[in-house]
Amino acid sequence: MKNCFKNIIVALLVLSLLSLCACKSTPEDISSAAVTSSEIEIVQNALDNIAEDETVDPENSETYRDDGASVQFEKTENKTGKADGIDVSKWQGKIDWKRVKSAGIDFAIIRIGYRGENGVIYRDANADYNIQQAQSAGVLVGVYFFSTATTAAEAREEAAWTNEAVKGYKISYPVVYDCEGYTNPDSRMYGIDAATRTDNAIEFLSYIKNIGYDAMIYGAKADFENASYWDMARIEKDYKVWVAHYSQSVYPTKQTPDYSGRYDMWQYTNCGAVDGVEGNCDMVVSYFTANEAQERDNSATPETAPPPKTQEELLYTDTNDQVTAKDEVNLRESAGTKYNIVATLKSGEFVTRTGIGSNGWSRLLYNGKTVYAITSYLSNEVIEAETRDIVNGSIFTPANDSVTAKQEVNLRALPTTDSEIVGKLTSGTFLPRTAIGDKGWSRLDYNGRVVYAVTNYLTTEAPEIKPEEIPNEETTVTEHGMTFTLVTVNVTAKEEVNLRDKPTTDGSDVIYTLKNGEYITKTGVSQSGWARLSYNGQTVYCIDSFLMQ
């Protein structure tokens, strides 16, 4: 809209604030009276705010709710007390509203705006065109605001913004608070509890109702029936409810949804086909009717909105590269989650990308057909999914050190005390540790076999030798024809050295190859250059000159 229109609206808001300040507030109108200077600033700065980066649009993402039945809309006869409608946003592209009216649609709930995942309020780029053309064609209009409010203050800002955004229009059907996607960890609303979420909704709805509009909340049946998401009893008693429930049988064959709470509208599919709308749209039945309303501000005259670009007119930057899904992504007939899914592209399956759009979508060539996918879900290379090292419920992180037992510890086949004992590790004998688990176990290399030991029973430090453990220097022992003077000292290999079952390189077996940094206890030395050692409870031998303390 022109700046002069925005200035008129701001001036009117200020006047309304002055009049509200002169009145006493009751509990019923407390929200409408609690207009703040920050809300005026929101209106001034965001009334005509159109997102250039459409990836901030919370509706510009794939949802995992099952699609409804495909419905070709036909004019409903004998619908006393009911009305047929659709709900639309910029993602339906350019709508021919005369054809929509001729098809038998009575009303449309049109997205007026939304709060992006970046916290900024934006106007739907097609809102003014859709409202003006729908009203011109004789289709009654309601609006919805897609909220990502995290506080009651933000919800009140959204309501104040919506009130200003619809001035000059005939809003005959409700002004709707739409809050979805809060279970997605990427949502700014993630982690908000049911009480706070309900408080936010009531803040918006009470503000709208006190202004004089019909206030309504929208949500899915499963969400409304889940007490961990909503306290619907607080909302149902004062405001209209619009429930989305996609069943196999749809209206008018099925007259009402399978919803346990009170409801006033039913969105019975998101795969409706209506003459005049390109692609899928949401189909709605209202269990009440409305007459055409009058503008609430005759002095506000919205400028005639230009028609939106069709899909073919959307500007794409031409490209020619190969892309795959980061994980998986739906390939759709057109750019928008309302359009039919042609196929699902999985990571590792490559297709040719022919264009990148400013709308957050990429144009692709799939089996000779032009399709569209959300750009942020695509990559030029396969992104390997993180594979976690999990054994018996323990998540292991790589390690690269050597450990010994503080005293003695069992070496087991699996990281559990119920598993087979493969051996024992005694203090002074070091083994390579290859991983540490999150549940108190370490993975070790034991003679080429993977074993596990309790981490708390291990240490990277060589054990101290107490004076009383040092033998008399005159004490000797003769083994395999060789005399050893007994000693007790912790040693490691200068680089690496073979530990043998006999003090000779001929006819002996290699028990283990000791590496630098792995400490064991030397228990004897001989004049022939061999050392006697204790390795894991076994007496072994190696060339003494290959050792160091």
Image (spheres, rainbow, N blue to C red):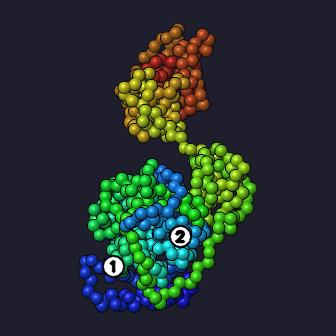
In primary-sequence order, the first of circles 1 and 2 is: 2
Identify which residue, 446 or 224, lies in the foreground.
Answer: 224
Is 295 situated above or below 348? below
Residue 438, quarter of picture: top left
Residue 2 seen = yes
Residue extending farthest to the top is 481
Is 541 situated above or below 122? above
Tag 1 and tag 2, C-beta contact below 8 Å: no
Disc 1: which residue:
210
Disc 2: which residue:
101
The residue located at (52%, 53%) in the rendering is 70
Q: Residues within 10 Å of mark 1 (few under 14, many from 20)?
A: some
Identify which residue, 285 or 226, lies in the foreground.
Answer: 285
Helix, strand or loop at mark 2: helix
Is 250 situated above or below 277? above
Say which amino acid is labelled 1: Asn
Say which amino acid is labelled 2: Lys
The residue located at (67%, 61%) in the rendering is 356
Q: How many marks?
A: 2
Across and down, in percent, residue 455 comes to 41, 35
Identify which residue, 486 or 275, lies in the foreground.
Answer: 275
